[in-house]
Amino acid sequence: MKGTQLAVRFALSPLGAAIDRFCVRAFGHSPVVWLFTRSDGATYNRPLLLTTVGRKSGEPRSVVLPCFEVGGGDIAIVGSRGGTPVDPHWAHNLRAHPEAEVHMRRRRRRVRTREVAGEERARLWQEIVERSPVYAHYQQRAEAHRLIPVFLIEPPGEPRA
């Protein structure tokens, strides 16, 4: 069994789900990200470091996230927070200040982000879930409280609709 399959199987087990929820609530990060980034690489690209501007503080806030190359080379990030009832802080920050900085593949660059909705979100969500089934489980956990947000990362000055 491949590393990705083992990681997904563990993440969906009762023990894996409990550990994941604890880590997300206590530390704001999912151990599933760690497992997948060390698996066979089929699920995620390398993780990226996202630096946002805090919506309340105005201070830089950084978080390591898994990312997905989708569509025509776009990069998507998912605000799952392990399926908890609330969106991650970085998602709120991006809604308030869509400009951010990403450090990925040894390159640091300024970007603009946008939250996707409707048919575009449905298409991207399907692509993400096919590559990483644990997100479907996260959405089931969060279903009563929220729709998990998906953001696209775009180079500055090149917004696409």
Image (cartoon, grey):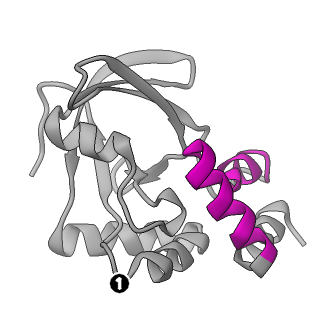
x then y, percent, for residue 29: 59, 46
Residue drawn at x 36%, y 17% is 109
| Left or right of 5 in this view: 24 | left
x then y, percent, for residue 91: 31, 46
| Left or right of 128 in this view: 119 | left
Q: Is residue 27 magenta?
A: yes
x then y, percent, for residue 17: 69, 72
| Res 74 seen here | no
The residue to which callout 1 is attached is: 144
Region rendered in magenta: 15-39
Residue 33 to residue 155: above or below = below
* Local SS, label 1: loop
Number of callouts:
1
Residue 137 to residue 121: above or below = below
- Residue 112 sits in quarter: top left
Main SS of the magenta segment?
A: helix
In this orientation, which residue lies closer to the viewer: 135 or 73?
135
Q: Is residue 50 magenta?
A: no
**Quadrant where the image shows the N terminus:** bottom right
Seen as rendered, the residue at the extreme right is 1
| Res 70 seen here | yes
Q: Give amino acid for label 1.
A: Ala
In this orientation, which residue lies closer to the viewer: 110 or 79?
79
- Residue 147 sits in quarter: bottom left
Residue drawn at x 45%, y 60% is 80
x then y, percent, for residue 95: 18, 43
Crowdedness near tag 1: few (<14), some (14–19) or many (≥20) residues, C-alpha within 10 Å: few
| Left or right of 97 in this view: 46 | right
Residue drawn at x 43%, y 15% is 108
Residue drawn at x 21%, y 53% is 115
| Left or right of 19 in this view: 133 | left
